[in-house]
Amino acid sequence: MSSRKKAQPKLVVVSNRLPFSKVHDDKGEFRWERSTGGLITAMDPILRSTGGMWIGWDGHTVSNIHDSYAQFDIADINSAEKHAKGSYGIAVVPLTSKEYREYYIKFSNGVLWALFHYFFEKSSIDIKAWKVYETVNKRFAHYINDVTSEDDIVWVQDFHLFMVPYFLRKMRPESRIHFFLHTPFPHIDIFSILPWQRIILESLLCCNSIGFHHKQYLRNFRGAVEAYRREKRSSGESSVEESVVTNIYANPISVDFELLDRTSRLERVRKRAGEIKEKAGCSKVILGVDRIDYSKGIKERLLALELMLEEEPGLREKFFYYQLVVPSREELDAYSGLKKEIDEIIGRINGRFSTGLWTPVHYNYGKLPFKELVSFYLAADIALVTPLRDGMNLVCKEFVAAHSDEDGVLVLSKFAGAIAEIKNCIAVNPYNIEDIASALKWSMNMHAPERRKRMRKMRKKIKHNNINTWLDRCMEYMHDREDGMPA
Ligand code: GDG
């Protein structure tokens, strides 16, 4: 391990995955592939302009962790990064394939993701996996300590790394350590199912600030902290976290409105959106875009579509539904099983309702290039975003930002964090397929003036609450404790 210590405090982002992944090419050689997502869009410019650092895993498992820690400059990744303005450090935390399975697949996704999205029946409490989760979190903390200075501002991201603050605080009693959670924080009735709830709370309470997407998650967190403190007091135990005042806040993450808006105005993108509409050959294009996940409500949404087709024969041949699905966590049974179920439902719907010239559901399993995705957003008259539970949901915000034509209807789940900001959508209960079907019918029949009025208001909101606003507010909460809400 080499060390990188600078006198000037810098921002250090720590997340499970780095903004780049190491991937094999056909010849078995490695290259770096840039990942997509809101966090990278937000963090990349600030890290570049301030010369910060990103610490995480590169997506590639190794057999010997001791020789696999790596540190380099982002400019060394490829020539595109070399020519980009500004730069920042990258530090790779290695994982073995066993650790990947236990820490990432089984514990982070199999236990925590399921529970934090209220699917407690899918959350299999696994003590062996917890041990590996702890080991990996400790490794992250030690590496942060090795490659950064005590004055740096360490900002840990998401549920994969809940225990990092605990281990890091032991080494750095005075440093600034912050946390942001990208999932919901569940109600105490759910959270208390987790056997490690106390130690996770103690770890979070080692932070100087903790951010959530939604006020409800913050209230749930506060409820859990109060219960934890009551229990401590009644048993006469002292708390490990008493020396740190934790500032907790709600601040909804957003999208790069300007980039999506600008991309949707490109000639190439408009032309492609036109082609998508033309190929559909129907009056309405409906769109669903999701990472494959049971929390996204893809299955329920398809059943709603089937119900609508059953009940309203007049709507047949009037729309085209595109479901874009990004592969995810295929190693978990809950995910591979879901893919099979989705395939079957789509097969059944198309089998029941297709006519010689029309097939209701079109399905793409894979990741589209960014401009192609924006073309789909722009082509869609209606976006169906119906997660059963979602910390925020960026897809609904991207759909709005990409509609530079100021038209389009958003049907949005009332269990997505985004519902707090987006008032002019059509809100649905994603568990109620009749509710989704009737929202869909309403959307298809909505007149242009109302569609435009709603879309303009949603665009105004997302334009104002964009990814930079989110980042600026987080920075304020991290720097100014007085502004937030003490835990
Ligand atoms: C977690 C939380 C929270 C999708 N298909 C393609 C593609 N995507 C991109 C979208 C969007 C992202 O994936 C999905 O983001 P979401 O927010 O909808 O969902 P999660 O992945 O579950 O994200 C969530 C988020 O973290 C941030 O805090 O909002 O609640 O669960 O950006 O555009 N991108 C490309 N091609 C595709 O085919 N290029």
Image: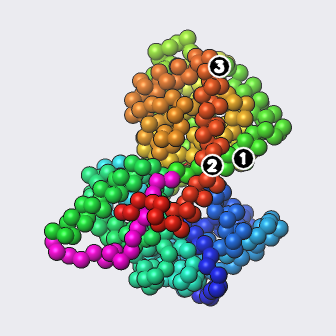
Q: Quadrant of the N terminus?
A: bottom right
Q: Earlier in the sequence, mark 3 or mark 2?
A: 3
Which quadrant would residue 244 be assigned to in this image? bottom left
Q: Secondary structure at mark 2?
A: loop
Label located before the other in sequence (1 or 2): 1
Specify the segment rendered in magenta.
235-251
Is residue 301 positioned above or below 201 on the image? Answer: above
Q: Residues within 10 Å of mark 3 (few under 14, many from 20)?
A: few
Q: Position of residue 72 (x, y in %)?
A: 69, 79
Give the residue type that dot 3 points to: Pro
Is the residue at mark 3 in contact range of ligand 1, meaning its CB lies under 8 Å from it?
no
Query: How far is the residue under mark 3 from the one under mark 1?
Result: 24 Å
Q: Is residue 324 visible in this depiction of the protein? A: no
Residue 322 higher or lower than 96, as above or below? above
- Residue in view at x 69 percent, y 39 percent: 402
The type of residue carrying mark 2 is Asn
In this view, 131 is above or below 355:
below
